[in-house]
Image (tube, rainbow, N blue to C red):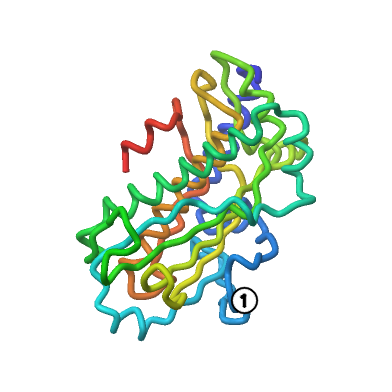
Amino acid sequence: MSKAKCIIVMTTLLALVGCKSTLTSWLRADPVPLTDFLPRHGDLRRMDDSCPFHYYWADLDTLMSANLKHIYIAPIEMGYLQKGSAWDEFAKSITTADEDLRDLAEYSRLAYYKAFKSMEKEIGATVVDSPDVPDTLVVESAIVAFAPTKSSVYAAGMVGDFFVPCLGLVTSSISSGTVAVESRARIGKDGPVVAMVADTENDPDALVSIAKFSWTTPAKINLKRIAIQTASSCTVDKMEDLDRGYPIEFISTFSDADLDDL
């Protein structure tokens, strides 16, 4: 991207920063269809744009009476990745597609682990490494949709320049990438599901240095954010109290090491 174009884009985004509700509505992705990873779709409540998640349900009475003392973060499921999506087209031309998906799943699990670990005191439960520990809430998640922007794939081959991953929302010339996650929580390894959330996010608007950039970087930014919001949901009385935050991030560099910030 030329310096002039970069300035125009960033000026536009900065002008919108003060209009949080407008930004949230404008930049938010439409939810993808729910998968069988989540049971009882009819129990899910469609949330408005003030909530970080598109869908939510919880059996609060059971959760409160269960006296849970531990939390286990299960490996991220990739078997529910929806077929026939834009991802399929990208996967045909990217030789490392399968390896990158495994990396995305591992990154996502670590993000959830660190997010819950950082909030142990607020949640009142300790993160453990086995679902077999008594009094454990097991958090299971699946990445159910994923497609990078064309600009992400293009920029991954560049060094020393800058670009805006969600540039298409400003110029209407590049479609936005998306990542969708479904999560469920159950009491014990084989116990009943007591909470469910689902969310789909567009690539965040972000000024990113390409030096350590990969084409999965925008999805990782979103996965980290979703993990933090999921952990934070255990610390509020109602979902409407959760802050979505600004859908714009200004980043000099991004890499897996950013998980150390959790």
Quadrant of the image containing the N terminus: top right
State the residue at coordinates (36%, 83%).
62
Residue 165 is situated, as x and y percent measured from the top left of the image, at 61, 34
Label 1 sits on residue = 41
Residue 67 is situated, as x and y percent measured from the top left of the image, at 24, 77
At label 1, which amino acid type do we have? His
State the residue at coordinates (68%, 39%).
170
Of residue 119 and residue 204, the one placed in the foreground of this image is 119
| Residue 3 position by quadrant | top right
Image vertical order of residue 205 relative to residue 25, above or below: above
Image vertical order of residue 138 relative to residue 176, above or below: below
State the residue at coordinates (59%, 39%).
101
The mark total stands at: 1
Quadrant of the image containing the C terminus: top left
Q: Residue at the top extreme? A: 160
Label 1 crowd bin: few (<14), some (14–19), many (20+), radius 10 Å: some
- The kind of secondary structure element at disc 1 is helix
Residue 64 is situated, as x and y percent measured from the top left of the image, at 30, 81
| Residue 26 position by quadrant | bottom right
Residue 112 is situated, as x and y percent measured from the top left of the image, at 40, 51
Of residue 49 and residue 192, the one placed in the foreground of this image is 192
